[in-house]
Amino acid sequence: MKRSNFSRFLLLWAGELMSSIGSGLTAFGLGVYIFNRTGSAANMALVTLLGFLPTLLLSVPSGVLADRYDRRALMMAGDGLSALGVVYILICMIRGDAGLADICIGVFISSVFSSLTEPSYRATVTDLLTKEEYSKANGLVSLAGSARYLFSPVIAGILLTYFDVKLLLIIDICTFFLTISSAAAVRKAMPAHRKGTQEPFLASMKAGRIIADNRGVMMLVVISSVITMFMGMFQILAEPLILSFQDAGTLGIAETVCAGGMLVSGVVIGIRGIKRNFVKTLGISLALSGIFMAGFGMIEDIVPICISGFLFFAALPFANNCLDYLARTNISDEMQGRAWGMIGFISQLGYVAAYGVSGIAADALGRVTGLGVGRGAALLIIASGILLALSACMIPMNRSIRALEKNEDEGVCEEKAVTVQDAT
């Protein structure tokens, strides 16, 4: 039986929490910086796309590296080198106002190196914990990921009232040292991950068979890709919607209030976990997310926007937890790195479509309707929410996805039977 290393997981998680807050400060600051200078949602979407695309394209080779080499060392390298992009943007700003091209270059550089981190981090969680701890850990992982929406916006909004965006970049750079230190401490405390098969690297990259061989996991990932497209529209368009009638300080407070929903449900899951009915919970939580997303764009008033956003983010951790659990428990430990790389690649293709289209569409709708980019963004958010809710209804009806939970239940029964036999 695998030994629990939950205290080491908490140390690693704390480092990722700090990194998430730092990245959130930079993302918020650069978003406000670009929108104030260009008034374009398309430019904001372009920066987000360039920050996301390298991570997506390199997720599969990064997953192979996570299975072949020391996962903690890869996390340290990814976090450390990704600071170079932020440093580049900071230098450009110190020398004068950084242009859109400078910001795109820096974000792209940072994303290339940070692509090493995610598959290694996900696989390390599997290395450290027992199966019974997965659900509780997933709640905490979701909470750390939400920190960039929960803590970063209000901190950044307050700081931008008195300082400029350069301070946010400096704080982000400092958080990289904390992340590297936590990963180094965990690496020192436990043996390096054993190297996987020594088959050629390109052959190892053919991880599609890991997913394709399990129809349920494949269907789950494909549906996730559709869902991320709608959620990506919300992610891009929420800021220009609010900035069209409020300032950066109000935006920061509103984002923090909205993300508070993720904090509440993340803490609940972290304490209690989800014990059963993962597929049903997944469908319900995503359907509710879509309904609340549509409500976000209905009225140009900060109070109902915050309420809808809070409820939207409150539903997300339940969906993320179920997605993570169903995939993690149906993939063998030695294939986790490659599997998460491929899962990340396929499921996040929807973000590419959203980032590439949403900003341009919002600008165009604002011009055509004469209502401006803010209401153009609102119309797209409403449509995305409705489509997300409809897509969520497909999940519980899919037999292959339902079988993932059944397979896990059978595995638990077999494990208990083996334990009883060993005891006798």
Image: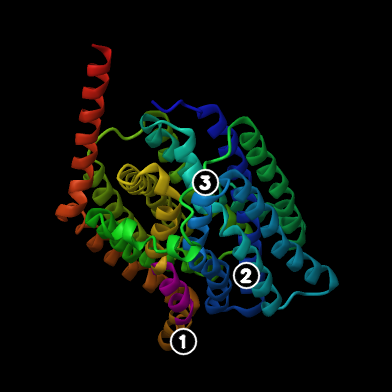
Instruction: Kindly give the residue lying farthest to the top in the view shown.
Output: 424
Residue found at x 41% / y 70%: 378
- In this orientation, which residue lies closer to the viewer: 63 or 324? 63
Residue 166's image quarter? Answer: bottom right
Whether 133 is drawn above or below 217: the answer is above
For the record, the magenta segment spans: 350-360
Q: Residue at x 23, y 46 (%)?
A: 404
How packed mark 3 is, by other alpha carbons closer than 10 Å (few <14, some 14-19, many 20 or more), is: some
Q: Secondary structure at mark 2?
A: helix
Q: Is residue 347 above or below residue 406?
A: below
**Label pair 3/2, CB-CB below 8 angstroms:** no
Relative to residue 362, is residue 253 depicted above or below?
above
**Residue type at mark 1?**
Arg
SS state under label 3: loop
| Horizontal side, residue 191 vs residue 168: left or right | left
Please say whether residue 298 is visible from this viewpoint: no
Please state which amino acid type lies under the numbered disc 2: Phe
Quick check: 160 left or right of 61? Answer: right
How far across and how far down the image is residue 305, in percent? 43, 58
Q: Is residue 354 magenta?
A: yes
Q: Tell me which amino acid carries mark 3.
A: Lys
Residue position marked by numbered label 2 in the rendering? 108
Q: Earlier in the sequence, mark 1 or mark 3?
A: 3
In this orientation, does residue 334 appear? yes
In 3D space, how far apart are the residues under numbered discs 2 and 1 (Cα atoms)?
30 Å
Magenta segment, principal secondary structure? helix
Element under disc 1: helix
Quadrant for the N terminus in the image: top left
Q: Is residue 70 magenta?
A: no
Report which residue position mark 1 lands on: 367
Residue under pointer 3: 195
Image quarter where the C terminus lies is top left
